[in-house]
């Protein structure tokens, strides 16, 4: 079973309103609590890992058992069906509440639609060198015509040429620069040692992979000019282009790009343990063994330079989606010689804290083989990318200068005003900026609704809270709960009916309206973890649902199978709606969780069960839940208050949401996003993160809830 890690932060989602921050975990080291505000809920003599295992088995054991079965079947369609059934169990457990996805928002932009890939896994969708950007705002009618033409020309290779002529005919001026909003600085310039999107998004501009998705969503040769697959599907052999160059940040050549650089890159990734190493664990021969130190000689790992220009990957078993993974950062090359010149070492000698280790400390300490060089990086201000004159495909680069401009998200109208004033080239609109756009007379002609995407944001429930202040700074995000309130909240959150009650009580449409506006508040709501239309089964398949052999026909969406299991279990979640998306069916665009009657019913069941443990819950003895929020940003403040109002009103005051003020976005993210393990999760409920897919298979979502530190999102539940 693949083990992956890619988590996204709501902070940047609400702001590009302005963008999204994706992270894919950190190392699997177990952190120590750092301050006396962090109290252990572990039983005396029972380790944190033992508590994590016990809680995981109690609350996610059924999900894991069914998901494990999916890895044992023969056909892809049966595997997808079993994954869908396991996801139903995940949703029923209510350890998380899906809320929204990206897109489905009012937006305004000078960026031409579909001039970069719209494939939403990996990091290729973050590449911007092929974008076409105009000096003028693009009108809605023209945007619609271009999108329709893209659908017609998709797969022909003709869209780029057609759209440039179309823009010229319509009086637009195409420019060679793109100004973009960003909300947080990279934490490292070493893409192979990181699992955060705030790192991968800028760094993907600096290197190319073996294969990449183009603007027509075709997987195309990049640094590899061709590849072959062995008859048994386990050996992939890539032939590199010759004459490729590594350069430094000044554009000076430092080395040739060779097959060995892909070997060096993946070894460094496994040495650095930045959080994505599990993407190859169990996939590439001996990758798991190397990560766990059972194998120390990297030549035994299934990544080899056959010769100077041929790199070979040997898999443990056939993986039908392996090539869809190649656009992700873990498969990036790294110049071995340049890395070593910066103090880098491999294997047991790797030590990023060594005095002479400078690799990735800043943009001047990495080598480049991609479309851009980073020529300026000023913290919380500006990042400037200039076209790399040594780039192998430089003639295809439309954007010669890419400028990122910092926006901390505190001003809800700044992004819109910056677009209007030609400072930046596009943004989503907040509730406040929608009104400004209407007053400006811009709304009707230029504002459009963006397409929904694959990232899933969620509210997470902490099953094993240990931290009551931020682990990085005990003076921040400090809980005001009494010891008695902590104990009651801890017990309540371990009750599935209580978690369902809270989930069913949240008016997610009102929550979403705080950032996207009333008119489109439903469009970006998501009701599953894996989007319901992410995959379809390609052949008829029969699977067991609660003892009944159930057939699903070829062409059945993943979400339909999720719903079939939920219905069979009698849980009142509408994860899939056959009538949504104009009758095509979808898991998006409606609220399939919010139901006050169901919430009250589940709460009453929880109260009855908890009373047997001597816990009284009523209006005079409510459950108090901490929800951290960023008070310096209007959007996050309004969203937090929407959650608070929903829960408290709909559950009759028997549950109180205590809003824990975080003075800025970083403090908020440290409460619920940056922690390395569940011990650092400083909340009872949190809405600051979610997940974006790494590759084109449901495993990219479901693997995140694996046990024993393998699933990155599992830590959001306060375990592992």
Image: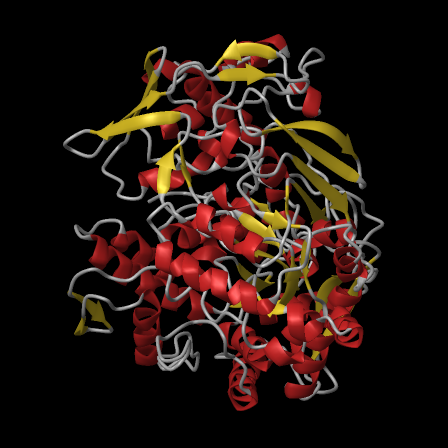
Measured as percent of width and height from the top left, residue 484 is found at: 74, 69
The answer to which quarter of the image holds residue 613 is: bottom right
Is 333 placed above or below 581 here? above
Is 634 placed above or below 507 here? above
Q: Please tell me which residue lies in front, 441 or 162.
A: 162
Left or right relative to 142: residue 656? right
**Is residue 706 something one can see in this rendering?**
no
Measured as percent of width and height from the top left, residue 362 is found at: 71, 25
The answer to which quarter of the image holds residue 438 is: bottom right
Q: Please tell me which residue lies in front, 12 or 111.
A: 111
Left or right relative to 644: residue 348? left
Could you tell me which quadrant the N terminus lies in?
A: top left
Is 135 placed above or below 337 here? below
Counting the numbered discs, the total is 0
| Colour approach in the figure | secondary structure
Left or right relative to 121: residue 204? right
| Residue appearing at x 43%, y 22% in the figure | 293
| Residue appearing at x 69%, y 11% in the figure | 356
**Is residue 688 something one can see in this rendering?**
yes
Measured as percent of width and height from the top left, residue 588 is found at: 47, 72
Q: Please tell me which residue lies in front, 71 or 621.
A: 71
Left or right relative to 399: residue 415? right
| Residue appearing at x 38%, y 82% in the figure | 579
Is 214 placed above or below 421 here? above
Measured as percent of width and height from the top left, residue 401 is found at: 67, 35
């Amino acid at each position: 079973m693949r083990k992956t890690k890619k988590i996204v932060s709501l902070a940047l989602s609400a702001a590009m309103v302005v963008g999204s921050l994706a992270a894919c975990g950190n190392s699997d080291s177990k952190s120590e609590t750092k301050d006396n505000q962090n109290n252990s809920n572990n039983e005396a003599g029972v380790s944190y890992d033992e508590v994590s295992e016990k809680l995981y088995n109690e609350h996610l054991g059924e999900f894991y058992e069914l998901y494990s079965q999916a890895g044992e079947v023969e056909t892809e369609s049966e595997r997808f069906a079993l994954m869908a059934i396991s996801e139903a169990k995940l949703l029923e457990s209510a350890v998380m509440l899906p809320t929204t996805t990206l897109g489905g928002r009012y937006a305004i932009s000078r960026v031409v639609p579909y001039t970069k890939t719209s494939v939403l896994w990996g990091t290729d969708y973050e590449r911007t060198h092929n974008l076409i950007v105009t000096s003028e705002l693009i009108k809605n009618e023209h945007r619609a015509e271009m999108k329709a033409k893209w659908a017609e020309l998709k797969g022909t290779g003709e869209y780029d040429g057609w759209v440039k002529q179309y823009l010229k005919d319509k009086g637009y001026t195409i420019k060679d620069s793109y100004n973009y909003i960003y909300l947080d600085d990279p934490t490292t310039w070493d893409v192979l040692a990181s699992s955060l999107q705030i790192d991968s998004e800028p760094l993907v501009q600096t290197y190319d992979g073996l294969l990449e998705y183009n603007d027509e969503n075709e997987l195309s040769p990049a640094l590899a000019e061709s590849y072959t697959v062995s008859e048994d599907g386990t050996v992939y052999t890539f032939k590199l282009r010759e004459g490729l160059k590594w350069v430094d940040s000044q554009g000076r050549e430092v080395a040739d790009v060779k097959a060995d650089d892909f070997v060096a890159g993946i070894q460094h990734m496994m040495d650095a343990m930045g959080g994505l190493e599990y993407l190859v664990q169990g996939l590439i021969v001996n990758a798991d063994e190397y990560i766990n130190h059972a194998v120390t000689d990297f030549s035994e790992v299934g990544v080899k330079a056959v010769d100077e220009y041929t790199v070979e990957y040997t898999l443990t078993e056939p993986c039908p989606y392996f090539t869809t993974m190649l656009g992700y950062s873990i498969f990036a090359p790294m110049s071995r010689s340049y890395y070593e010149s910066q103090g880098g070492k491999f294997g047991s000698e790797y030590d990023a804290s060594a005095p002479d280790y400078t690799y990735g400390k800043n943009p001047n300490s990495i080598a480049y083989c991609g479309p851009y060089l980073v020529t300026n990086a000023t913290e919380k201000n500006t990042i400037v990318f200039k076209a790399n004159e040594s780039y192998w495909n430089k003639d295809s680069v439309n954007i010669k200068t890419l400028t990122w401009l910092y926006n901390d998200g505190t001003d809800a109208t700044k992004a819109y005003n910056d677009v209007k004033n030609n400072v930046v080239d596009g943004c989503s609109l907040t509730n406040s900026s929608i009104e400004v756009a209407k007053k400006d007379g811009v709304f009707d002609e230029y504002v459009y609704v963006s397409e929904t995407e694959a990232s899933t944001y969620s509210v997470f429930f902490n099953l094993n809270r240990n931290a009551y202040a931020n682990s990085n700074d005990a003076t921040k995000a400090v809980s005001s709960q009494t010891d008695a309130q902590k104990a009651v909240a801890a017990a309540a959150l371990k009750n599935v009916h209580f978690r369902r009650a809270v989930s069913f009580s949240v008016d997610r449409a009102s929550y979403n309206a705080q950032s996207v506006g009333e008119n489109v508040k439903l469009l970006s709501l998501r009701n599953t973890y894996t989007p319901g239309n992410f995959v379809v089964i390609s052949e008829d398949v029969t699977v067991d649902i609660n003892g009944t052999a159930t057939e699903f026909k070829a062409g059945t969406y993943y979400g339909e199978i999720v719903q079939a299991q939920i219905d069979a279990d009698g849980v009142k979640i509408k994860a899939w709606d056959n009538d949504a998306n104009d009758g095509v069916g979808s898991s998006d665009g409606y609220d399939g969780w919010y139901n006050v009657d169901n919430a009250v019913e589940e709460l009453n069941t929880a109260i009855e069960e908890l009373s047997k443990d001597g816990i009284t819950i009523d209006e005079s003895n409510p459950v108090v839940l901490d929800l951290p929020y960023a008070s310096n940003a209007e959007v996050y403040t309004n969203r937090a208050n929407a959650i608070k109002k929903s829960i408290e009103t709909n559950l009759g005051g028997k549950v109180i949401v205590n809003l824990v003020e975080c003075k800025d976005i970083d403090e908020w993210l440290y409460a619920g996003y940056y922690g390395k393990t569940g011990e650092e999760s400083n909340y009872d409920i949190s809405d600051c993160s979610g997940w974006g897919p790494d590759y084109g298979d449901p495993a990219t979502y479901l693997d995140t809830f694996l046990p024993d530190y393998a699933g990155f999102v599992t830590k959001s539940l306060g375990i592992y």
